[in-house]
């Protein structure tokens, strides 16, 4: 009998799930699960309310969870505990979201794997495991090139009055924001990184405007300078990207790779399809 395998790829904003059973795949979605930002009870509550898999009817043999924030023994323990509460008879393995990006884009080859989604991250993958990586400093100190980093710049430009009249009107129509609301969401409410990341879509939706092109190019260039150019073998290996921001700004990534003489590899929005094939 073949095993039932459940795979999860979780970012700060959303989680993609695929259940593999006898060669068939079923897909599910929930909000993001992040052990640094959520308690075990929080994660269990999300699973109970959003994951449309009945653990009594579906006995899962193996769960392979890839997620943002899974870098320490404590964070792995927290996510495993929540998953085992919901799926008590399953064998749970947890990995970083970087491993998901590496396995999905590099396969069994050497390369640099990058994530550009709500946040950002990168690593050198030797074909089997992650050998080295740049530190990920989170939405306050890092996440260069990620959605929240880009969204932060959008808000800075808007509230400092740098938008022209046309762009300001588009922003007002799209969001209807005041400064108090923004500060309240960023400094007092949960998941400020998700809140900031939503404004990156304004850049993508209004491509071509020189101010927004500057925001996108500067944000991604910061990622190249602070992350990619720090790898000694950066000019010898393909560099792969995954995530919503990477997919939305593929043209700028290609330009920057050419500028810095870097070999551009695969660019995928979600690594789940390749991950599912990895386990098949």
Image (spheres, rainbow, N blue to C red):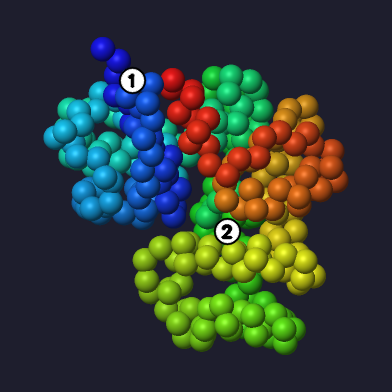
Report if the CB atoms under discs 1 and 2 are less than 8 Å apart.
Answer: no
For disc 1, the neighbor class at 10 Å (few under 14, some 14 to 19, many from 20) is: few
- Given the current orientation, which residue lies at the most extreme left position? 56
Left or right relative to 115: residue 278: left
Left or right relative to 3: residue 196: right
Q: Looking at the rendering, which quadrant does residue 59 occupy?
A: top left
Q: At x 24% / y 40%, what residue is drawn? A: 53
- Residue 147 — which label? 2
Q: At x 43% / y 40%, what residue is drawn? A: 9
Q: At x 45% / y 48%, what residue is drawn? A: 11
Q: Which residue is mark 1?
A: 22
Q: Looking at the rendering, which quadrant does residue 204 occupy?
A: bottom right
Q: 216 and 226: which one is in front?
A: 216
- Report the mark closest to the observer, 1 or 2: 1
Q: At x 74% / y 42%, what residue is drawn? A: 229
Residue 35, x across and y down, in percent: 34, 48
Q: Quadrant of the N terminus?
A: top left
Q: Earlier in the sequence, mark 1 or mark 2?
A: 1
Label 2 element class: helix
- Residue 242 — which label? none
Label 1 element class: loop
Q: Looking at the rendering, which quadrant does residue 110 occupy?
A: top right
Q: Quadrant of the C terminus?
A: top left
Residue 226 is at least partly visible in this image: no
Residue 196 is at least partly visible in this image: yes
């Amino acid at each position: 009998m073949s095993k039932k395998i459940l795979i999860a790829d979780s970012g700060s904003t959303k989680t993609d799930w695929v259940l593999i059973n006898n060669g068939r795949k079923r897909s599910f979605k929930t909000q993001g699960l992040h052990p640094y930002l959520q308690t075990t009870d929080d994660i269990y509550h999300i699973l109970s309310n959003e994951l449309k898999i009945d653990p009594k009817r579906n006995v899962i043999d193996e769960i392979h969870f890839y997620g943002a924030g899974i870098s320490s023994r404590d964070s792995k323990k927290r996510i495993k505990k929540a998953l085992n509460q919901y799926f008590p008879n399953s064998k749970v393995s947890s990995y970083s979201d970087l491993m998901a990006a590496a396995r999905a884009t590099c396969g069994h080859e050497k390369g640099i794997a990058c994530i550009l989604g709500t946040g950002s991250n990168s690593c050198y993958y030797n074909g089997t495991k992650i050998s080295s990586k740049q530190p990920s400093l989170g939405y306050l100190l890092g996440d260069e090139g990620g959605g929240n980093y880009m969204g932060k710049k959008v808000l800075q430009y808007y509230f400092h009055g740098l938008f022209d009249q046309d762009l300001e009107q588009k922003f007002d129509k799209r969001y209807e924001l005041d400064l108090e609301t923004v500060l309240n969401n960023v400094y007092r409410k949960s998941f400020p990184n998700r809140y900031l990341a939503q404004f990156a879509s304004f850049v993508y939706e209004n491509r071509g405007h020189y101010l927004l092109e500057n925001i996108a190019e500067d944000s991604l260039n910061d990622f190249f300078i602070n992350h990619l150019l720090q790898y000694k073998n950066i000019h010898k290996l393909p560099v792969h990207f995954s995530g919503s921001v990477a997919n939305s700004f593929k043209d700028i990534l290609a330009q920057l790779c050419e500028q810095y003489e870097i070999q551009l590899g695969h660019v995928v929005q979600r690594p789940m399809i390749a991950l599912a094939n990895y386990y098949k």
